[in-house]
Image (cartoon, rainbow, N blue to C red):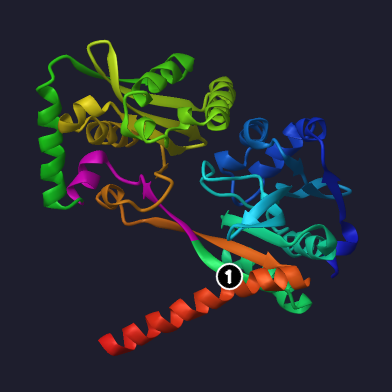
Amino acid sequence: MNHDQDVELKTVTTFNEFLELRHDWNSLLEQSGNDRVFLTHEWFASWWQAFGEGKRLFIIAAVDRDGIQGIAPLMRCQSSFRGIPVRGVEFLSNDDSPGCGFILKKNHEYLAGTFFSFLLNDSKEWDVIFFKNMIHDETINSLMVKVLEQTGKRYIVNPGLSSPYIEIKSEWDEYIKGLSSKYRKTIRNVCNRIKRLGDVDVGEYNDMKGFDDIVSVTEKGWKYREGKAFINCPDRNRFFRLLSEEARNKGWLSIWCVYKGKEPIAYEYHLKYKGCDIALLSEFNSEYKNFSPGSFLDHEIIRSLFVNGVHEYDMCGIHDEYKKKWTNNVRAYKNLIVFNNSVYSRFLHFLEDKPVRFFKRIRDKVTVTGT
């Protein structure tokens, strides 16, 4: 059966059109195999209002007689590739996004190929397609690659984020016994160390009072001094404020803080969504570095999740050393770069592909030599 004959593709290019999709968007997400908070309409609405300047919405909806069956949350943008200006098609995402991808109703995975065919036929409008940190499974990835192979487009697939997560399927005591004895000792030392501060408390907030406290902590942290904190960047600051307001209204917001007396000295910014807890930001007051308030808060949060009906803790980001102490589970994302057939795009592919092949050869030689 030719599924494509039953589907019409519609593009959404204005923010007002996008806002009208809220109900259908979230309804489709619930029926997909990737119902994640960073694919909700609320997330993308906050993201676009904060980061959308200079970009153009290019959302593609696959519609049949039963309604919307798939959504590609995309944008057109003037970007740079290895320092060279390009016309790009990308997900509505950036480094504050844990991942992104097509939203497809279950049993409609074939639409990934439909979306890709549509994009490739639109090749006069872009130089590079860059899909960063795709959440798709191998079925969907293979459908996209199949279309690329059939059309002869040059492409490169690279590893994206490796995001650690904890599956919460046991009691807390059982889980912590499974950690290394060395790390259990470290946790005990951290908890004992924080007690030396005296009047220490931990609070979880679901409103904007918690947001005000995380700003207070961030202003005294190392990231702020180095210009890397979210409040150093007006667009990032706006994104997390807008997201917090949306999350508060939906009951998703979860901001944890460590207090010494009434002073917040460490925080973690989380969202709770359908049994999954997602960590997005964290920081501590550098004046209290020797007391490890951030590590103490990690312990308190994870312990609480084991008794609050959460089935997964998504630690997001990369598999840092401190996260490896808590879990070996990793969700691996992929980056897909597709190049147009123009001379310009082929040159871009040459720049990207040649160093990759060169370093692979070096790596393989080192591996062979070492065996």
For the magenta stretch, what is the residue range?
A: 160-178
Asked which quadrant contains residue 342, the reply is bottom right
Q: How many other residues sit within 10 Å of disc 1, few (<14), some (14-19) or many (≥20)?
A: some
Mark 1 lies on residue: 352
Residue plotted at (38% across, 18% down):
213
Q: In this view, does 272 lie to the left or right of 16?
A: left
Q: Does the magenta stretch include residue 165?
A: yes
Instruction: Give the quadrant of the N terminus.
Output: bottom right
Residue plotted at (74% across, 68% down):
344
The amino acid marked with disc number 1 is Glu
Q: In this view, does 231 lie to the left or right of 166?
A: right
Residue 350 spot, x, y in % from top left: 62, 75
Q: In this view, does 176 lie to the left or right of 138?
A: left
309 in relation to 116, above or below: above
- Secondary structure at numbered mark 1: helix
Res 282 visible: yes
Instruction: Give the quadrant of the C terminus.
Output: bottom left
Front residue (pair 291, 43): 291
Residue 18 spot, x, y in % from top left: 77, 35
How many numbered circles does the render carry? 1
Front residue (pair 371, 55): 55
Residue 109 spot, x, y in % from top left: 70, 60
